[in-house]
Image: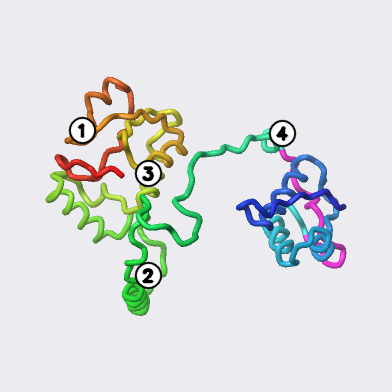
């Protein structure tokens, strides 16, 4: 059964992914029913002027998720035992977010917020040290690590916070994440509810703003002064806010705003 399939090569979504989504939509809408035969890889590739590997990648994804079943010489069909999709699944709106990545993978321009001096990164030294660590690693390096982070590192962070910031905490209270965005994701998914108020420095860090908006927070801009975020203004503007995003600068130091 050949369906009209429209693909947009100008989209950022890969072609194989677009093809996968078109088949899923056709199955959800009932245009493709359980047991219906789908075009052969070669025929569909020729029809859409695509490489066979592109069509095969889409089919493999559909078969891996149970939408299609390969029957050898009999061709590929929509899985006969596929349960009907509810109307809620078919028509659920896609939640679009305003988050945009810092860059799309091309060579970044200099002096961009959120990016260090990548050209100054010691890649050769890093590669040598990483290779040495991998060669010396034992079996413990092949198992799942502590999701909270490396225990000695968490202990060192707790000690540092006590000395430099006056924050008393234990290593068990420290979580090591894969970057600033990952920390915000952890906090927002575990502690934040949709619509919770959050004080945000104005001006503030744009990546924090985008991440919190994506998580559903209601951001309340709060001005800053020589001591950082103005708490009195925050209380006046949103006394019931549950979170505050403040500068990582030490107290008493005016953050540099670009």
Query: From mark 2 to mark 4, how far is it between C-alphas?
Result: 46 Å
Q: Nearer the viewer, mark 1 or mark 3?
A: 1
Residue 211 x, y percent position in the rendering: 42, 42
Residue 27 left/right relative to 104: right
Q: Nearer the viewer, mark 2 or mark 1?
A: 1
Q: Was residue 91 drawn as part of the magenta stretch in this picture?
A: no
Q: Nearer the viewer, mark 2 or mark 4?
A: 4
Give whichever of 67, 8 is nearer the camera: 8
Query: From mark 3 to mark 2, how far is it between C-alphas?
Result: 27 Å
Question: N-terminal of the two: label 4 or label 3?
Answer: 4
Single out the residue that lies furthest toward the front. Answer: 110
Residue 44 x, y percent position in the rendering: 81, 60
Q: Is residue 44 visible?
A: yes
Query: From mark 2 to mark 1, how far is it between C-alphas?
Result: 47 Å
Residue 20 left/right relative to 214: right
Which SS class for mark 2? helix
Q: Which residues are magenta?
A: 70-85
Give whichever of 252, 94 is nearer the camera: 252
Q: Which residue is mark 2?
A: 141
Q: Is residue 137 visible?
A: no
Residue 160, relative to residue 28: is it above or below? below
Residue at image coords 14%, 50%: 164
Residue at image coords 83%, 49%: 3
Question: N-terminal of the two: label 1 or label 3?
Answer: 3
Residue 177 x, y percent position in the rendering: 35, 53
Q: Which residue is mark 3?
A: 184
Question: N-terminal of the two: label 1 or label 4?
Answer: 4
Q: Which residue is mark 1?
A: 225
Question: N-terminal of the two: label 2 or label 4?
Answer: 4
Which SS class for mark 4? helix
């Amino acid at each position: 059964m050949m369906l009209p399939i429209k693909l947009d090569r100008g989209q950022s979504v890969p072609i194989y992914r677009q093809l996968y989504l078109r088949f899923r939509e056709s199955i959800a809408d009932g245009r493709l029913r359980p047991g219906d035969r789908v075009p052969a890889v070669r025929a569909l590739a020729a029809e859409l002027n695509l490489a066979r590997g592109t069509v095969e990648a889409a089919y493999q994804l559909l078969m891996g998720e149970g939408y299609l079943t390969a029957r050898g010489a009999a061709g590929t069909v929509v899985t006969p035992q596929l349960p009907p999709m509810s109307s809620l699944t078919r028509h659920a709106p896609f939640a679009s977010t305003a988050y945009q990545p810092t860059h799309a993978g091309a060579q970044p321009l200099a002096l961009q917020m959120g990016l260090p001096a990548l050209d100054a990164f010691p890649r050769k030294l890093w590669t040598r040290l990483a290779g040495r660590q991998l060669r010396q690693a034992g079996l413990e390096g092949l198992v799942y690590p502590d999701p909270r982070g490396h225990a000695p590192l968490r202990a060192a962070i707790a000690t540092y916070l006590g000395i430099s910031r006056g924050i008393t905490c234990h290593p068990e209270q420290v979580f090591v994440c894969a970057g600033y965005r990952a920390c915000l994701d952890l906090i927002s998914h575990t502690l934040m509810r949709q619509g919770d108020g959050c004080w945000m420095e104005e001006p503030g860090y744009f990546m924090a703003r985008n991440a919190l908006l994506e998580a559903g927070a209601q951001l309340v801009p709060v001005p800053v002064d020589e001591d950082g975020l103005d708490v009195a203004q925050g209380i006046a503007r949103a006394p019931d806010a549950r979170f505050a995003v403040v500068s990582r600068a030490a107290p008493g130091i005016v953050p540099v705003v670009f």
